[in-house]
Amino acid sequence: MPPGYGYGPPPGPVRAESGTSYDAQGRNGRGGRFGWLGELSLVVVLVVVGIVVVTLVGAVIAEVLGAGPEEADSEVFFENPVADMAFQLIGIAIGIPIVLWGARYLGKRPAGTVSSVVGRLRWRWLGLCAAVSVPLIILQFGALFAWTWGSEAAEPSGDGFPGWASFLLTLAVLGALVPLQAAAEEYVFRGWLVQVIGRAVRSPWPAVVLASLLFALAHGFGQLSGFILLFYSAMWWGWLVIRTGGLEAVITLHVANNLLALGLAAGFGELASTQTAADAPWQAMVLEFVFAPLYCLIIARLADRRGIERVSP
């Protein structure tokens, strides 16, 4: 019996036609007119379930080991902030395999097309983006510290330096898990979500705007300046993904930002803090107005010079 009929083997993944932009990688003619709704709904459910499962596993482990906090109404599962942070990062990182599975088995397209238009992460390009993003993020953080020095916003609120043994262990945990956590947020918001909505709309901008709004809201409700910072930067990052045909540039910037932020928090003994980028002060927002477009425009120019693929080959 020919494949595709009766009980024959299911057809394999189908790529979008040549010359398709990043946001349109899901337009492969599979799944019907409203197939994107099924992919969207099921993947969102699986992401929520995955986070709940990781949370429950963390709670059980903390209970079994007697490593939970002394306060019964505490918002954390582990008294040790490094262990608690590790489970938070893992809970986000599981988004990567879930959205890749959704693209492959629900969107019926190669999972690698979520990474880039060539169907994989372009590691050399990712390394080049990292060479730009790391010093730029250090410069941005340095400018923020210089601007807010002596103000209430810059006052450390933690327990101080925890000692070299604890600090180095924390850096090792962060170095192993933060890249997965930051990449997962990019795969979910700037990658898979944009492509799923791109199956239904012709312009990338409805998807970029919605994904940027959800990205900002996912960080919680803090200060208005923090929300504006997150939404503004997410819009620029969404543009950069379309412009460069992949997630590499935004992954490196996100990883560099989170590693530096959490590394500094660990050094000042503030790893247990519940604050996120949503609580960023207005000075951080103003600096983001400059550094977000600066990074994106530098990378876009570099992509042009390097001939980085913007559409599927």
Image (cartoon, rainbow, N blue to C red):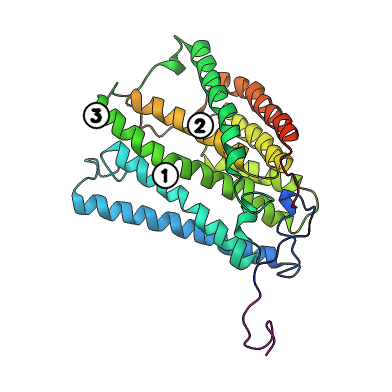
In the image, 39 versus 20, the foreground residue is 20
Compared with 25, 186 (above or below) is above
Q: Main secondary structure of the magenta part?
A: loop
| Amino acid beneath label 3 | Ala
Left/right of residue 237 with respect to residue 82 in the rendered view: right
Residue 206: x, y in percent?
74, 47
Which is in the foreground here, disc 3 or disc 1? Answer: 3
| Amino acid beneath label 2 | Ala
Compared with 264, 27 (above or below) is below
In the image, 213 versus 181, the foreground residue is 181
**Residue at horizontal 34 percent and vertical 56 percent from the top:** 56
Start-end of magenta stretch? 1-11
| Residue identifier under label 2 | 256
**Mark 1 or mark 2, which is nearer the start of the sequence?**
1
Residue sitting at the far bottom: 1
C-alpha separation, residue under disc 3 versus residue under disc 2: 23 Å
C-alpha separation, residue under disc 3 versus residue under disc 1: 21 Å
| Amino acid beneath label 1 | Leu
Indicate whether residue 4 is drawn in magenta.
yes
Q: Secondary structure at mark 2?
A: helix
| Residue identifier under label 1 | 89
Q: Secondary structure at mark 1?
A: helix
